[in-house]
Amino acid sequence: MLRINLPPTGPTRVTFADFRKYRLPIPSKGIKDRGKTETVLQFDNEDEAVIYADHLEEIVTGVSKNSPVRSILRDMVTAIRNDDTIRNYLEYSSIYTWVKNRVKTIRMAIKPSASFLKN
């Protein structure tokens, strides 16, 4: 089981009550509050954590800039992405590398180069 701590980065820490209040998706293995200092997200493995972070990033795009949910979501994504276990997983994951390279190729095909536009 993978546990990722959500340190209190904002004026208040993220709690289970925030998940209910804002109807945020809950990780696969749930959430635990550790005292009054931090909240812990629990996952089966690194892959689930990465998929969860990607899902949160998709939600952020639909939230207004002034909403408190936006900062909560960004803090959660940052905590997941900055976790050492997740970083190692992404760095050494061949599937992630393959997808990342394919996305670059697709972006280049969609967005032509400046020299192509001049002709």
Image (tube, rainbow, N blue to C red):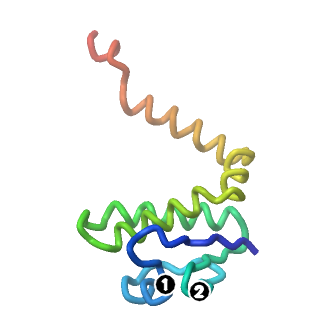
Q: Which mark, residue 33?
A: 2
Query: What residue is at 58 percent from the left and 77 percent from the top?
Result: 27
Q: Quadrant of residue 60?
A: bottom left
Q: Please indicate whether residue 13 sits to the left or right of residue 7 in the image.
A: left
Query: What residue is at 67 percent from the left and 62 percent from the top?
Result: 47
Q: Say what secondary structure mark 2 lies in.
A: strand
The residue pinned by badge 1 equals 15
**Picture coordinates of residue 98 (x, y %)?**
65, 41
Q: Is residue 50 above or below residue 18?
A: above
Per the model, the C-alpha gap separating discs 2 and 1 is: 7 Å
Query: What residue is at 44 percent from the left and 29 percent from the top?
Result: 108
Position of the C terminus by quadrant: top left
Q: Quadrant of residue 31?
A: bottom right
Query: What residue is at 36 percent from the left and 24 percent from the top?
Result: 112
Q: Residues within 10 Å of mark 1 (few under 14, many from 20)?
A: many
Decide which of tag 2 and tag 1 comes sooner along the chain. Answer: 1
The residue nearer to you, when weighing 38 against 42, is 38
The residue nearer to you, when weighing 117 against 39, is 39
Residue type, mark 2 in image: Asp
**Picture coordinates of residue 61 (x, y %)?**
34, 60
Q: Please indicate whether residue 31 sits to the left or right of residue 45 in the image.
A: left
